[in-house]
Image (cartoon, rainbow, N blue to C red):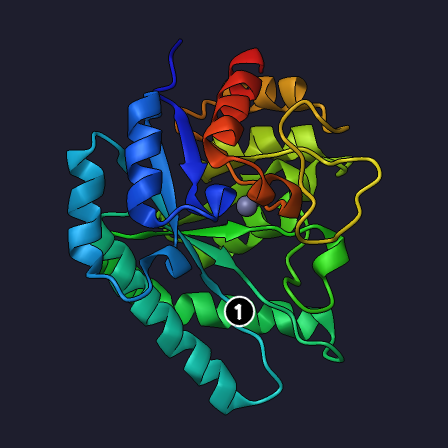
Amino acid sequence: MDLSRLCIHTITTRPWSLDVAIEQYSRAGIGGISVWRQALAGQDVRRAGERIGNAGLQVVSLCRAGFFTSHTAAERRQAIDGNLTAIDEAAALGAPLLVLVCGATPGQPLELSRQQIETGIAAILPHAESCGVRLGIEALHPMYAADRSAVNTLAQAIDMAQRLGSPQVGVVLDVYHVWWDPHLYDEIARCGRLGRLFAVHLSDWKVPTTDMLNDRGLMGEGCIPLAAICRAIQAAGFGGFYEVEIFSSTYWQMNQKQFLQHIIAAYTQL
Ligand code: ZN
C-alpha cells in the first residue's frame, strides 16, 4: 500500500498532540503532514520541523493564515503583520506552503473584501518570496462568503494568483469547497496549465450536513465525485500530496488510531 502521497492535516486528528500525530502518521507509513498553527502553540517551531523530518515525514503546508479583510485600515495592517509572522513560522517549520483563508467582513461588499485580500497578499508576497514560502489561496464554499472568505470559486482564486503575477502564489483546491462548481473541471485544467495548483485537500460532503464547520465526512461517505475530481487533478499534472483535512466533531470523539485506519482505507479505495 503506497501512502507516500498521502498527507494528513493535524486538525483531522485534533485530539492528538503534534508529537503523537507525528509518531502515529509515521508509524502508519504516511508520507506527509500539514501542520495547523494551533498544534504548534507554545513549541519551538524549528525543533518541531526537525522532529517531523526525523520521523520520515514531509511537511506539506502550514495552515493557516489570511483573514486580510476589515472595515479599518489598522486591522488590515494588523492582519498583514500576522501573516508575516506566519510566513516566518512556515519557514522555521520547513513548510514550503502557507495556506491562506482569505477573509470576509460582514456588511462589507464582497468586491471590496476581494480588493483588500489582493492588496494584503501583495503586501506579504516579497517576504514570502525571500523566505522561499509559497502562498496558497484557498477558495471557500459560498456558505462562508459572509465572514470567512470572499474568494469562493477556483476561478476567482486562479485569477487573483495570476494578477499577483508571482510563481510563488498559487491555489489550494479543497474539494469540500469547490465540488459544486459547474466550471470545476475546466478550472482544474486551467490551474494545472498555469502551474498554479499548489495543494489538494480531501474530505467529503455529508448529506445531510449538520454543521457548517465540523461535520465533514471521510472520503466516500458523501456526495463529492472524488474519483472524477482526482482524475482531473492528475490529468492537470498535479504531482503533490493528497491531503486529508476533516473537521468532524464525530470523528474527533472516536479512537484516533481507528480513525486513522479509516482514513487510510478510504484513501486507498480512492
Ligand atoms: Zn482546506
Q: Nearer the viewer, residue 1 or 242?
A: 1
Q: Which residue is mark 1?
A: 67
Q: Residue furthest top?
A: 1
* Picture coordinates of residue 142, whole percent (x, y): 75, 54
- Assign a secondary structure to mark 1: loop
Amino acid type of the residue tagged 1 in the rendering: Phe
Q: Residue furthest right?
A: 208
Residue 208 in the image: above or below residue 193: below
Q: Nearer the viewer, residue 241 or 266?
A: 266
Residue 154 in the image: above or below residue 235: below
Can residue 36 be seen in this snapshot? yes
Which residue is drawn at the image coordinates 21% and 29% (left, top)?
56
Which residue is drawn at the image coordinates 36% and 78% (left, top)?
81
Quadrant holding the C terminus: top right
Can residue 96 be seen in this snapshot? no
In the visual, does 11 lie left or right of 139? Answer: left
* Picture coordinates of residue 147, whole percent (x, y): 68, 69
* Picture coordinates of residue 20, whole percent (x, y): 32, 41
Which residue is drawn at the image coordinates 34% and 32% (left, top)?
24
Which residue is drawn at the image coordinates 55% and 23% (left, top)?
262
* Picture coordinates of residue 161, whole percent (x, y): 49, 52
